[in-house]
Image (cartoon, grey):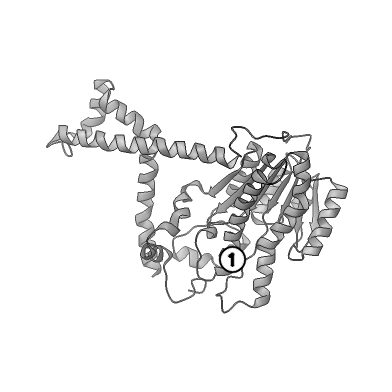
Amino acid sequence: MTSLRGNVLSLLLPIQVFRAVTNEPLITGPLLYILTRGPVHIRERILEPFRKNLLAKNGASRIGTTIAILKVYFIIGVLRRFNQAMNRIALNGWALRRRGEPFVFGPTKQELVVITGGSSGFGYEMVKAFSKLARVVVFDVNDLPPELETIPEVHFYRLDISKSKKVEEACTDVKRVHGDPTVLINNAGIANKKSTLETTNEETDRLFQINIIAHFTLIREFVPAMLRMRKGHIVTIASMASFVAGEGLVDYSCTKTGALFLNDGLRRELQRIYVGGEAICTTSVHPSWYQTGILAGAEEVLAKQGIQPRPPVEVSDAVVEQVLKARSGRLIVPAGAEMWTSIRTWPLWVQDMVSGLGRGNSMKQ
């Protein structure tokens, strides 16, 4: 089944590349222009390599067919770009520019960023990046690495965010000592990496507390001040597991789907219910396979499936860029993974083939 999954993925890759090229109007548009109205010498230079094979017979007819296809793809590409632009406007409260007070990132470090799970993985990279632009508060149950401890304006709280009361107490202290944060990054997460029947009730409770309940607690603690300041950004580190549930990760996928819905629902509430909510940005981030603690112990399984985890700094860079733009969004990282967000709309048999559906637990094969 693993080899079948690999074969399917190898077939999907060129399809993905083909879609990326044909859906790009900056590629199809110039080609269409050259074949219809462009200078003759440029057109002939492009067509010359095909004169002896594809265009050897019925050349004019085939060129006409190509032009017709390019017109279709160009229109689709323009509509796709229009759709993306409208989505960006909708995500930001149907405004071309964010309303509210401006963010001030830079050497003066006027903004305060709270990052959960900042001692490793994505959080570690984000702490390093944001510490150059803002004051940073880190919540983590694990020690802060020495290289982060020495950075000025990085403040560490040893905190088990599965304990809601402890989270409330830590948030109260942050507001008292450091002021109200303007950026909240709900990054901390765990995975049991067991099948549903192998997982204990205690393990499931803890996973939900960390991966989703803590998000609610932190939002309730920090967003009221953001509303008063008319400035804020809530970043939710979800996962590609928000869109598909794999064996051995069912509970994890449930929390990541919940994180996506929390982000989307909060955005609507900010726009429709809360005074000043239009000034608050919300961003969900959906990484695929990255080198974090979540994948620890699964490297061999991933290698057999042809999956090479990527460096976590890619996700950190995307998050920092999004926050600095002060815009709401949904980030799929890496960018080429967008097609997987629609997997639930695919035929069920295709989903099964791609996921390598089998009777065994994929985390143990």
* Residue at (54% x, 58% y) in the render: 242
Image coords of residue 29 (percent x, y): 35, 31
Q: Residue furthest left?
A: 57
Q: Residue furthest front?
A: 273
Q: Residue furthest right?
A: 176
Q: Residue 279: which quarter of the image?
A: top right
In the image: residue 355, left or right of residue 219? left
Image coords of residue 177 (percent x, y): 87, 48
* Residue at (75% x, 50% y) in the render: 148
Q: Is residue 53 visible?
A: yes
Q: Nearer the viewer, residue 178 or 7?
A: 178
Look at the picture and state if 98 lies above or below 117.
above
Q: Residue 2: which quarter of the image?
A: bottom left
| Crowd rating for badge 1 (residues with CA inside 10 Å; few <14, some 14–19, many 20+) | many
Q: Secondary structure at mark 1?
A: helix
Image coords of residue 284 (percent x, y): 60, 50
Look at the picture and state if 311 lies above or below 22.
below
Image coords of residue 42 (percent x, y): 27, 24
Which residue matches tag 1? 252
